[in-house]
Amino acid sequence: MESNRQKKIAGIIQKDLAEVIQLELKSAGTSNLIVSVTKVRVTPDLLQARAHLSIFPSDRAEAVVEEISQLKPKIKHQIAQRTKNQLRRMPELSFYNDDSIEYINDLEQAFKGKDNPIKNPDLLDKRKKS
């Protein structure tokens, strides 16, 4: 269970991370992407932060997460500058693709169409807990 301190730091990082990623993508010239930071989890020792990114269009999601991971030192530095009065030490960042919106869309389409998973549960992929 997350402590209030973890939640507070995760919220601060999530807000700043969304702004920094948008600026980085805009400066890189990829303006036709929508990237949102859906969730940030911080470890109890406050040394690591896992950021889950939702990317549209989703077919380029893995490539974009990889590109953002390459920019990690620059992103970490910018967030550290923004949070220097709130955090003593900036957590190490790691980025993951959040495909939950795509999964929900697939479910909605399945319910509307002839491939109804209630009648045939084998149609759905097995999901892992995040």
Image (cartoon, rainbow, N blue to C red):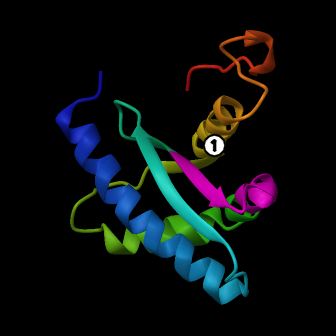
Which of the 4 image quarters holds residue 106? top right
Task: Identify the image quadrant of the C terminus.
Answer: top right
Give x and y (percent) for residue 5: 21, 40
Residue range corresponding to the magenta coloring? 51-65
Which of the 4 image quarters holds residue 29? bottom right
Which residue is depicted at the point 40% across and 39% down? 42
- Judged from this view, the residue extending furthest toward the left is 4
Q: What element carries label 1?
A: helix
Magenta highlight on residue 55: yes
Camera-side residue of 91 and 16: 16
Residue at the spot of label 1: 105
Judge left or right: residue 48 versus residue 11.
right
Mark 1: few/some/many CA within 10 Å (<14, 14-19, 20+): few
Amino acid type at mark 1: Asn
- Is 19 rendered above or below residue 60? below
- Is 76 rendered above or below residue 122? below
Camera-side residue of 81 and 40: 40
Which residue is depicted at the point 59% across and 47% down? 94
Give x and y (percent) for residue 95: 61, 49
Judge left or right: residue 61 versus residue 41.
right
Give x and y (percent) for residue 113: 73, 34
Give x and y (percent) for residue 91: 44, 49
Task: Identify the image quadrant of the N terminus.
Answer: top left
Camera-side residue of 88 and 49: 49
Judge left or right: residue 33 versus residue 6.
right
Magenta highlight on residue 14: no
Which residue is depicted at the point 47% across and 50% down? 38
